[in-house]
Amino acid sequence: MILKKYKNQLLTVIQESGLDPNLFTAEDGDIENIDINFEFFIIGLRDSTIRFAVRPWHGSFVEFGYCYSYFREGFPISETLYASNIELLTTKFKMWLNSIVTPYLDDVGTPDFWQMLEETRSHTKYEAGTTEDFDSFSDEEKIRIRLSLNEFRLLIVKNFNPNQEELKAVDARLNYLSDAIDKHNKFDWKGIAINTVIAITISLSLGPEQGRQLFDLFKQIFSNVLYLLP
């Protein structure tokens, strides 16, 4: 068995890494085709097959055998490796968190821009909108939307602090979206608006969490204007 104090140290490593401990599971069990005569303490990433497993090294409480999932297709598990002490084990565990768990979570949380673009095109082409969806904007609606675009720009500056070149790119996108109000009906403008937010996300090189934050800000502002997004 693994002593509780060492199990707790592995949990501390997760906490210090900035990851949410609730993302992980922990149990004692076997690893298929790996040292079948030994029981491992298995730390798993929820809703995935990614694992880091530890066992005593031939009965020792202070030496360890460990194996972990590679960052490869199917996340195959390594052979059992040797750690001569808890310091070396926690170092290897940190490496696993940084090189396997974090990239996996980043990818899971990254918006799929290609899918969003395809869905937008599909909805624009096939979705049966109401008659009002295909109306042009009234003068009052145009004023309200342009005011909201200005508010959206201010929030982008406040939350993401773009540099001068990035701000130019943001302004160009928002100006295009503002001009589109006069040229397109409500239904078509919705698709253009979504594509604009995607383009701004790319222009600002936002990470997954910041990308979600930008979309949330956009929905917060424009859902009260035209219910643009579900």
Image (cartoon, rainbow, N blue to C red):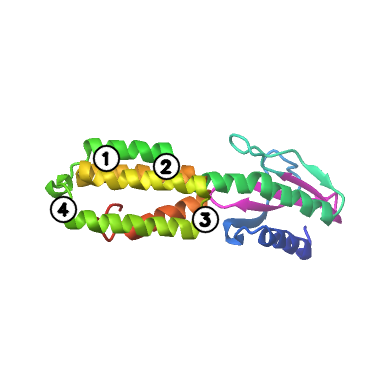
162 vs 203: above or below: below
Q: Which mark is residue 36?
A: none
- Tell me the kind of residue under disc 1: His
Name the front one of labels 2 and 4: 4
- Measure how far apart labels 1 and 2 are at the Cα level: 19 Å
Residue 191 visible? The answer is yes
Please state if 2 lies on the left or on the right of 29 as rendered: right
Query: Which type of secondary structure does the marked residue at label 1 adopt?
Result: helix
Label 3: how many Cα within 10 Å (few below 14, some 14–19, many 20+): few
Residue 52 spot, x, y in % from top left: 69, 48
Q: Nearer the viewer, residue 35 or 21?
A: 21
Q: Which amino acid is tagged 2?
A: Ala
The residue nearer to you, when weighing 94 against 220, is 220
Give SS at disc 3: loop
Give the Cα distance between marks 2 and 4. 27 Å
Q: 5 or 144: nearer the eye?
A: 144
- For marks 3 and 2, give the CA distance: 17 Å
Left or right: residue 187 compared with residue 169? left
Residue at mark 2: 199
